[in-house]
């Protein structure tokens, strides 16, 4: 297997496995495949492209490097502020198309956007820094990006069903979590002890995904008769 094939495999395979899991976890009213796959693709193309352009501008063409604590703080903050809204553009597509109806829908589309973004980002990192970087990131960033985008996706899902009037708090939480993760990731490059913080936040991200999954499935279970009638199974 050549290097490019290895990069593609480790960048996209873990993300697609996660997407498959969350898609099939939506048991009562699975989302249309074209919207789920489309959101994944948008997250890995449009969102990545917009984030790259804005980050290059805000870091002066990459000349502001996260080497010192102050520059690490700035670059991490830029990443959170830029990348989460960029991924949200992919989530807004199924939202505007009327495909969201609760927490589970928001979770599926949020995860799809985040995983698409993480996969392409890992592929690009591999092109720039080598296969080992892609392999390492393959088991970390899909969970992280998936969780942060899931927060925003759940916000849109709750807005679609009238349970919240604003998604701003969800954006803020996702941006803060992204910032904290990147900040300690940058610091750990020179101080390996900070990897403990990354492990902690990885577990927190997993807990968030698990919480949304349980809550979303419980909400869908409470509406199973509504879904049954909507599909016309009474005929």
Image (cartoon, helix red, strand yellow):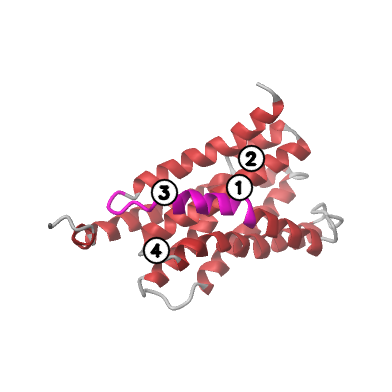
Q: Which mark is residue 102?
A: none
62 sits left or right of 78 in the view: right
Answer whether labels 1 and 2 touch (C-beta < 8 Å): yes
Report whether residue 61 is seen.
yes
* Nearer mark to the viewer, of 1 and 2: 1
Secondary structure under tag 3 reads helix
Q: Which residue is mark 4?
A: 100
Q: Which mark is residue 33?
A: 3
Q: Which mark is residue 118?
A: 1
Answer whether labels 1 and 4 touch (C-beta < 8 Å): no
- Find residue 66 and report its horizontal and vertical position in percent: 79, 54
Q: CA distance from mark 4 to mark 3?
A: 13 Å
User: Which sits earlier in the primary sequence, circle 1 or circle 4?
Assistant: 4
Q: CA distance from mark 1 to mark 4?
A: 22 Å
- The dominant secondary structure in magenta is helix
Instruction: Name the residue furthest top.
Output: 1
- Residue 83 image-quadrant placement: bottom right
Q: Which mark is residue 137?
A: 2
């Amino acid at each position: 297997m050549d290097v490019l094939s290895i990069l593609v495999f480790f960048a996209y395979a873990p993300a697609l496995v996660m997407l498959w899991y969350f898609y099939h976890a939506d048991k009562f009213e699975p989302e249309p495949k074209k919207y789920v796959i489309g959101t994944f693709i948008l997250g890995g193309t449009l969102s990545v492209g917009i984030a790259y352009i804005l980050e290059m501008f805000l870091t002066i063409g990459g000349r502001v490097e996260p080497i010192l604590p102050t520059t690490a703080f700035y670059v991490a903050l830029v990443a959170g502020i830029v990348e989460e809204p960029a991924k949200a553009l992919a989530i807004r597509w199924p939202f505007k198309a009327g495909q969201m109806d609760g927490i589970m829908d928001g979770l599926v589309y949020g995860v799809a956007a985040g995983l698409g973004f993480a996969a392409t980002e890992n592929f690009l990192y591999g092109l720039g820094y080598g296969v080992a970087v892609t392999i390492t990131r393959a088991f970390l960033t899909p969970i992280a990006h998936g969780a942060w985008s899931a927060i925003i996706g759940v916000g849109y899902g709750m807005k679609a069903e009238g349970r919240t009037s604003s998604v701003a708090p969800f954006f803020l939480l996702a941006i803060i979590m992204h910032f904290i993760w990147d900040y300690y990731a940058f610091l750990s490059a020179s101080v390996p002890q900070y990897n403990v913080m990354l492990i902690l936040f990885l577990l927190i991200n997993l807990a968030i995904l698990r919480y949304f999954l349980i809550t979303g499935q419980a909400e869908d279970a409470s509406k199973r008769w509504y879904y049954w009638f909507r599909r016309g199974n009474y005929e």
